[in-house]
Image: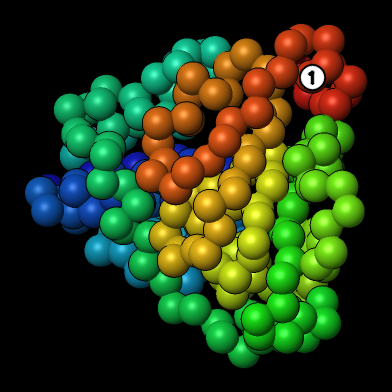
Amino acid sequence: MKYFIDQPGCLGDIIFTLNFAEQLSEEAEVYWHISPAFWESGIKRVQSPATLGPHVSRTSDIDKVYKLCDMVHRGDSELMRGKYTHYGYDWSNWASSIKYERDHETENDLRKHFGLEKGDPFIVYNDCYGSDKFHNGVVNSIPDGYDGKVIKLEVFNEATVFDWGWIFENAEQIHTVDTSILYVIESLDIKSNTLSCHPRHYKFIIPMINNLFKKPWNFVEYDRDTWRKCCPDEAE
């Protein structure tokens, strides 16, 4: 039997459904096309029993296609869990399938780039999502007068989100808009218990993802007017 997974992006969705591919692989050969941008964003380092990558295409001998990317409306609270449950699979062990070879040299280069010595106190935050949109509320979670360094996620050479592993693991606090960062962090042994996530949409996001994670995320709630000021580029 041959199965095909239709979930070419985005990065967080791909990471979340790696376990779906692993479960399917117990039944059949699994093929999964990944869009080049997300492949180069780090998925090419992921270890999976499925055959995946930008070179994979849906062929005529595929026995079943699992469409995960356009099943429900964005306002459906079951959008993420439904990628599994719609087809009768358990989603709860999804993070166990996040397996990849860490690039400790690049992680160390990032640490040095920010002038961090091992043991230094620091906060890391990310206010960017969708490559060119920003959530202006994320910085409000950074304590006034914090005496350590404040590190903002940024483009660094060819590093991917997976290469921020050391920084994520050693930060005193992590504050971010909801992105693939949450899914990567779920696989790491982090020190921080102060984690805040600012939803890119005030109404839809929290019900959709708040019970996916075992890490102690605080999901910051917004009323519509405050959210609109913080995320002026996000669709209603």
**Quadrant where the C terminus is found in the figure:** top right
Residue displayed at 19% across by 34% down: 89
Tell me the crowding category of disc 1: few under 14, some 14 to 19, or many 20 or more residues within 10 angstroms, Cα based: many
Left or right: where does residue 14 sit relative to residue 84? right
Q: Amino acid at mark 1?
A: Trp
- For disc 1, the marked residue is 227
The image quarter in which residue 109 lies:
bottom right
Element at label 1: helix
Q: Nearer the viewer, residue 60 or 122?
A: 122
Q: Colour scheme used in the picture?
A: rainbow
Q: Residue 105: x, y in percent?
A: 62, 89
The image quarter in which residue 117 lies:
bottom right
Q: Residue 204: x, y in percent?
A: 58, 17
- Regarding residue 214, the answer to whether it shows in the image is yes
Q: Nearer the viewer, residue 116 or 81?
A: 116
Q: Residue 171: x, y in percent?
A: 64, 65
Residue displayed at 27% across by 23% down: 86
Up the image or down, 6 lies above or below 229; here it is below
Left or right: where does residue 167 sit relative to residue 64? right
- Regarding residue 154, the answer to whether it shows in the image is no
Up the image or down, 163 lies above or below 21; here it is below
Residue displayed at 57% across by 43% down: 10
- Residue with the most extreme bottom position: 105
Residue displayed at 55% across by 68% down: 169
The image quarter in which residue 48 lies:
bottom left
